Structure formats: structure tokens, C-alpha cells
Amino acid sequence: MRWPFARSSTTASEPSPISAEEAKKRILKGNAPRGLHVRGHLNLAGCRDLQTLPRGLSAASIDLSGCVNLRELPYDLTVGRLNLNGCSRLCGLPDGLRCFELSACNTRLRTLPSTLQVTNRLDLSGCTELTSLPDNLKVGSLVLRDCASLRALPEGLDTHFLDISGCTQLTDWPRRACVRIGRLNARGCTRLVSLPPWLTHVAQLDISGCSNLQRLPETLIVSSWIDVAHTSLTELPPQLQSVPLRWRGVPITPRIAFEAETLTADEVLAQPNAELRRVLLERMGYGAFLATAQAMILDQDEDPGGERRLLKVPLVGDEDLVCVAVYCPSTGRQYLIRVPPTMRSCRQAVAWIAGFDNPDDYQPLAET
């Protein structure tokens, strides 16, 4: 198989291809000639002293992950698959770079050249200094997970799978873009308040953690599932009401998602699936659950806020639910905080919450 961006043949002016092992030796010794043509996969991962690559280097795939002193790539690099993960000193890519797949996770890239072409997959996860992308970027799959400085997506973006999870600075969408019947993962994009009108058809939609998202477009079609955990949605538009729902990956019913006040402690205790039981507990709330589940009192004492109680409810097939009930001395409000089931006293539980494994080490002057 020939890669679409690798040289397909040699000419009289080109050197003959050499093995990947021989190429690696020459590159690390610093005596690799210009126009080096490598057969197969060139693995330079973890070569911490590597700072540059020879001009005119050509290979089907190159792994440079963990090359922490690599500062730049040659402008005439020819490669099909390129792995730059963890190249922490790499701040830019050369103009005209063309790849089938490019992974540059956890690098210091701030932007990308407008001439970059990636056909299949572009992964920029963890590029925390990335602030912008070139307009009219077209790629099969675009992964921007945890790009916390990225404030906007590019105009004219065209992709099938878009992952912007953890992009906490994103506030709006481009006026013109396209996600083509694939997946949109916007998990944890807390500043997004809406989805764009051009998003009309996706297979999977993960909007969990989009706490300011209150409604979905009337024109949106989702063919597989929607994850609605920790959004502000109270219902779905008519065309989406038959779409399967998830809560952080766990399949749920619309009642669990939008009518949590109707859930009962008996339903929680009778649920045999541990993952779904945890979702039911979360949706019902520890306070409402413990108030009607006949919780056992493991311990009881007082602190400056008032009475404290350590409560326990056994759960079949899962670890016991143990919570400490405390009162805030300044507001008088009661708080229920889940603690490990190994807790045996209120003092031990409160010390664990404060970060102390040994309760004797927890000696606050005043608990507020």
C-alpha cells in the first residue's frame, strides 16, 4: 500500500530508500543526508536529544512522541502518519505540511498554518496554549479535547467527528461550519449556551456537563443517542423525544433525566444494575434518598455547627452508601457528603473530607 502523501517512486536524482533502523541511526548521529527516503515506519519516540530532522525526509509514518527537545520540523517533510505527542518545545508546524493522520497532543502549538492538510484525523488534545485554528479547516476527525485556551472554532470547519470536550473557554460557534453525520462531543463545555443552526444531523451527541445549555435546536436530528448529564435541559424538542438518552454514558429513561423528583428510594434499592443505581442516587439526591431509605445511624456527635450523624444504607452488589450529615455554623444549612464505606465515626469522616487519613491529625481551631 502506498500512502497518499509519501513519495511513490524514486528517480535518478533521489537516493534509494533505506530501512527505518538505518535511518534512525543516521538521524541520531547527525549525519543523515538531505532527501532521506525511509522504508516503512520510522520510530524516533522518546529520543530526548533530538532537536531537528534532516531536510527532505520522507517516510510512510514517523513517531516523534516524547521528543521533548524537538523545536521544529523541516518545511519539506513528506509523511503519511505523524505522531508529535508530548513534543513539549514544539510551538509551530511548517507551511504546506500534508498528512493522512497527525497527532500533536500536549504540545505548545498556539495555532496551525493555513496550508496544513490532514485528511483523516487531527488530534490536538491537551494543547492548552492553542488559541485558534485556520479557517476552512477540513478533516475527517478533529479532536480538541482539553484545549482550554481555545475560544472559537474556525469559520468553514468541515468534519465528520468533532471532539471539543473540556474546551471551557468556547462560548460560541462559527457562522458557517459542518459536522457531517458523525459525533459531536462537547462534554464539559460549560460556557456554551446553545448549539449552532448548521448542526442538523449527527449520530451521537454528548453534551454532558454543558451546564448552561437549556435547549436543543428544533432542526437537529440525532440518530443514535444523546448524553444529557448535568445540562440545564428540562425536555427535548419533539423530533428528539424518541432518541435514547445517556447520563455520563449510562443508558437512562426520559423520566430519570427530566423528572428526577418522582424517583423513590425503593426504586433505587431495587435497581440491580450498579451503574444505573448510582445515576438514580445522583438524580434523586442523597438527602431525599436517606430521608426515606431507613438509613442506619453509625455514629452521632456534635461540632460548632450542631449535630453530626454518620449514616449508612447497604446497597446490593455495590459498596455501601455512607454519608456524613453536618450543619454549617454560619448558615445553619445541612450538608450530606458521601464518604468511603470504611468510615466508622463522624470525626473520622470529617477528617477524611479535610484530607487527613488519621483523624488524630485533624485539629481545626474552628470548623466553619
Image (cartoon, helix red, strand yellow):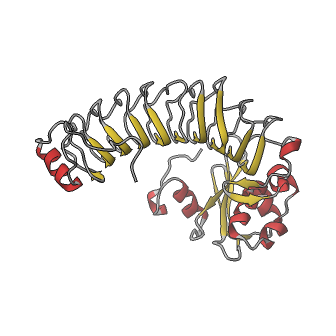
- Picture quarter with the N terminus: bottom left
Whether residue 51 can be seen here? no
- Picture quarter with the C terminus: top right
As drawn, the residue found furthest toward the front would be 12
Q: Is residue 192 above or below residue 59?
A: above
Numbered-mark total: 0
Residue 231 at x, y percent in the picture: 72, 42
Compare residues 309 and 34 and report the one nearer the observer.
34
Instruction: Name the residue at 45% across, 33% down.
Output: 117
Q: Quadrant of residue 218?
A: top right
Residue 18 at x, y percent in the picture: 20, 51
Q: Is residue 158 above or below residue 17?
A: above
Q: Is residue 118 left or right of residue 153?
A: left
Q: Is residue 326 above or below residue 191?
A: below
Q: Is residue 306 above or below residue 56?
A: below
Compare residues 168 and 44 and report the one nearer the observer.
44
Q: Quadrant of residue 295?
A: bottom right
Whether residue 180 can be seen here? yes
Q: Quadrant of residue 214?
A: top right
As drawn, the residue found furthest toward the bottom would be 316
Instruction: Name the residue at 52% across, 58% down.
Output: 351
Residue 5 at x, y percent in the picture: 39, 40
Instruction: Name the residue at 60% across, 33% down.
Output: 158
Compare residues 137 and 7 and report the one nearer the observer.
7
Residue 270 at x, y percent in the picture: 80, 73
